[in-house]
Structure formats: C-alpha cells, structure tokens
Image (spheres, rainbow, N blue to C red):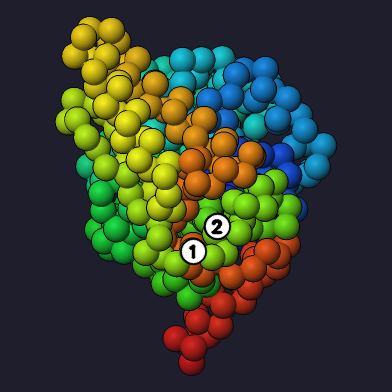
C-alpha cells in the first residue's frame, strides 16, 4: 500500500469513490484529513461550480485530494483547465476512453492521470497512452458498472499490469480483510464509495443514509438496458420506484431516436442527465422512493453512521490483522 500512498501523497492508499452529490467538499476533505484520498465528483457540474467546489474543499483541508471528470462532459477541456489553475495533483477520468488531447492537457498542468480500466485490453491501451495509474472496478460497485466482478478482474489484471503502474481495486469492498487480499495480489490500494455514504461528514439526506443502513447486498440491483441502440451503462442502486422511472425514460429517449428527434450522442447525454437529476432527488432532497439510491453490494456492511476517520481506522486495523494472521 505504500506505493499507492506515495503516488497519491496520502497516508493510506484508500481513494474515495466519486459519487455525484455525495463526494463534495465536506466528505472529500474528511477523507483526506483522515489519511485517505478524497475525490470530488465533478459529474455534470459547470466550470464555475467545479471552480467553487475546489476552492471550498481547499478551505477544509490542506491534504491532497483529486477531481473526477466524466469523459463525455461537453466542457471537459475547460474543466481540466480549472483543475490546472487550482494545482489539483490528480485527475480521475471516468466514463470511457479519454477523448483526444485530454490526457495531454491534464499532464501539461503537472497533474497525474488516473483512468478506469474495465478490461485487460483496455488497461494495456491506457498504459500505452501514458496514464499514471488505473482503477479496476467490478460490477459489485454502486453507480455506473461494467459486467465483470471485482474478484475476476483482479485475478485477470493485477498479475499482468500491477508491476507497470499503481492499480487501485474497487467494487464491493466493505472490510479490511478484502483490502489485504487485493494488496497481496499486487494492488497499490483500493477505492471505496458505498462505505463512506453514511459517514458523519457526508451531506447525504438522512433518508438516503437510512436506506443504506436498512439495505442488504441483494437490495442493490443493476438497471436494465431496454434498447440495444441506446448506449446505456448499467447503474447499480437500491430497488425502488425510481428504477421503473428509468425504464420509462429509456423508452422516451428510444422513441426520440426512432423519430430522428435526437442524435446518439444527445441520447447518451439525456440518460446521463436523468441519472444526475434522479440521484440529486435521493441524495439532497431525500426522495429515496422516486430518486436513484446508488449503492454497491457492500451496502449490507454499512451498519451505522460514524466519522470518516473511524471508518478508515477500522478498515486499516482489519487489513493489518488479516496480514499478520497470514504471516504468522
């Protein structure tokens, strides 16, 4: 884990998963202050909003933190410029292959680039293109997910790429014993999102946190893609009426495609905006029935609301104890 911590500039190599509306200044600063590495979820933020969010986070912590940018954001290059102006040391790119020129633009600011790699072939391509670190995230994660489990991705990819650059494992991690296992396999650290939602410092609505505390692993289900033409990335969230609303939204967008009302890129953006709005309804407004309660399958291991520092300390104690047992 020291390799990951050195790369991030943090005490421990635990990245905060970037969760729209949840991973904002308060939780990001709390994770960094507790020795981890907080990451601002830019999501659908405007350039001005991100500018203010970075400034506000800096006011709460003097420790390193990163910014997660969505590759399909129409203002991606301007958002990269904002990160550069603030001297953000690490930019995480999510949502597909980095568009032409984006990696170079980030590196020109002096920042390190972290990308998601849902397959070994993609990981090798990203390494060749010059990324500085990778996150391999399995389908147990909350929010946008791929089709393969974390344990399979880790077994397939870590032996092939972990020697080349720091690799962080994500998806379904709820205890330190799992962290220890991935470190032994060659990971430089881990990324956790669901585990931090019920942190005391998280601004998520009390209803949102209660939904997490009541849920079991089987309540966190993946959304269904209705139309093969619609490039809908599945999203894992707690079962509720909001899932049915998304099905209706897909039908609406598919109809617009049929009628020539929207182009494919616009259709994808409409779906992304739907998720941003549905997530806001749940996280900020507390509508956990009609909003999107994005959660990973590790939600069943979230038992109480507690300070971020306590969450990280418990994970590290569990990981250390597991490694000592294996060594002894």
Q: Residue at x 63, y 73 (%)?
A: 314
Dot 1 surroundings within 10 Å: few (below 14), some, or many (20 or more)? many
Picture layout, residue 295 above or below residue 257: below
Residue 320 placement (x, y as % from top left): 57, 78
For the question of whether residue 297 can be seen, the reply is yes
Mark 1 vs 2: CB contact within 8 A: yes
Residue 165 placement (x, y as % from top left): 42, 48
Q: Secondary structure at mark 2?
A: helix
Dot 2 surroundings within 10 Å: few (below 14), some, or many (20 or more)? some
Q: Quadrant of residue 187?
A: bottom left
Q: Residue furthest bottom?
A: 328
Q: Which residue is mark 2?
A: 211
Q: Residue furthest right?
A: 59
Q: Residue at x 35, y 15 (%)?
A: 266
Q: Residue furthest top?
A: 260
Left or right for 319, reference 122? right
Residue 323 placement (x, y as % from top left): 50, 80
For the question of whether residue 164 can be seen, the reply is no
Q: Quadrant of residue 241?
A: top left
In terms of depth relative to the viewer, which is nearer, 136 or 25?
A: 25
In terms of depth relative to the viewer, which is nearer, 18 or 257?
A: 257
Q: Quadrant of residue 221?
A: bottom left
Left or right for 180, reference 82? left
In the rendered picture of this protein, how many numbered marks are placed on residues? Answer: 2
Q: Residue at x 62, y 17 (%)?
A: 47
Residue 162 placement (x, y as % from top left): 37, 55
Q: Which residue is mark 1?
A: 215
Q: Residue at x 48, y 75 (%)?
A: 177
In terms of depth relative to the viewer, which is nearer, 48 or 6?
A: 48
């Amino acid at each position: 884990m020291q390799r990951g911590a050195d790369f991030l500039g943090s005490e421990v190599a635990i990245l905060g998963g970037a969760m729209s509306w949840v991973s904002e200044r308060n939780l990001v600063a709390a994770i960094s202050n507790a020795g981890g590495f907080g990451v601002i979820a830019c999501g659908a933020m405007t350039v001005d909003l991100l500018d203010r969010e970075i400034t506000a986070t800096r006011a709460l912590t003097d420790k390193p933190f990163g910014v997660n940018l969505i590759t399909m954001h129409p203002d991606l290059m301007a958002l990269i410029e904002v990160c550069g102006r603030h001297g953000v040391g690490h930019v995480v790119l999510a949502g597909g292959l980095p568009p032409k020129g984006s990696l170079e633009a980030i590196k020109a600011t002096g920042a390190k680039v972290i990308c998601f790699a849902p397959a070994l072939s993609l990981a090798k391509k990203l390494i060749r293109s010059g990324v500085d670190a990778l996150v391999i995230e399995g389908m147990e994660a909350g929010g946008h997910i791929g089709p393969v489990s974390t344990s399979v991705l880790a077994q397939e990819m870590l032996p092939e790429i972990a020697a080349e650059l720091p690799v962080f494992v994500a998806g379904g991690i709820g205890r330190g014993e799992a962290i220890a296992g991935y470190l032994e396999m060659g990971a430089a650290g881990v990324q956790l999102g669901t585990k931090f939602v019920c942190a005391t410092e998280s601004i998520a609505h009390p209803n949102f946190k209660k939904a997490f505390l009541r849920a079991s692993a089987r309540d966190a289900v993946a959304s269904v893609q209705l139309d093969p033409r619609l490039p809908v990335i599945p999203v894992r969230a707690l079962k509720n009426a909001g899932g049915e609303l998304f099905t209706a939204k897909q039908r609406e967008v598919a109809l617009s495609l049929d009628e020539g009302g929207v182009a494919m890129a616009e259709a994808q953006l409409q779906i992304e905006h739907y998720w941003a709005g549905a997530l806001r309804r749940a996280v900020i407004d507390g509508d956990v029935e009609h909003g999107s309660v994005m959660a990973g399958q590790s939600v069943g291991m979230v038992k109480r609301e507690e300070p971020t520092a306590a969450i990280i300390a418990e994970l590290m104690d569990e990981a250390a104890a597991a490694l000592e047992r294996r060594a002894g």
